[in-house]
Image (cartoon, rainbow, N blue to C red):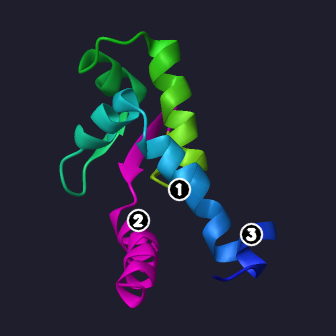
Amino acid sequence: MKNDYAQTIPAEWQQYSRLFSALGDPERQRIVLAFEPGESLNVTELTRASALSRPTVSHHLRLLCEAGVLERTRHGREIHFRLMADSLIQRLQTVIDYLDAHR
């Protein structure tokens, strides 16, 4: 057993708690699954596709951005969101590599 991880989590792993927490919510999963490859969506578009209120969608979008799942960019007065697929693949690959090494 690696006792040193019982007290502290390595820095590169600390981000995963927020990532998995963000992806663990069914409403946030629905938001993530709404994106087509390379697509950019704004809050209005995501709210129309959802049964949630605009403030609730905005809340979920904020958490997804903080977790590094989505990135936001401003286009005039609107903020558009895009799935950070490459970054997610890289982060999840780190977890897969760790698990693969411990089979």
Label 3: state its secondary structure: helix
Q: Which residue is mark 2?
A: 88
Q: Out of 75 and 66, give the one closest to the viewer.
A: 66
- Decide if residue 49 is on the left or right side of residue 71: left
Q: Which residue is mark 3?
A: 6
Q: Residue furthest right?
A: 7
Q: Are marks 2 and 1 in contact (CB under 8 Å)?
A: yes
Q: Main secondary structure of the magenta part?
A: helix
- Decide if residue 65 is on the left or right side of residue 47: right
Residue 46: where, in percent of width, then height?
Answer: 32, 26
Label 2: state its secondary structure: helix
Q: Which mark lies nearer to you, 3 or 2?
A: 3
The answer to whether residue 8 is seen in the rendering is no
In this view, 101 is above or below 70: below
The answer to whether residue 97 is seen in the rendering is yes
> Residue drawn 27% across and 16% down?
48
> Residue drawn 81% across and 68% down?
7
Q: Which residue is mark 1?
A: 68
Tell me where the magenta segment starts and ends, as one range. 76-103
Measured Cα–Cα span from mark 3 to mark 2:
26 Å
Q: Earlier in the sequence, mark 1 or mark 3?
A: 3
Q: Earlier in the sequence, mark 2 or mark 1?
A: 1
> Residue drawn 49% across and 17% down?
56
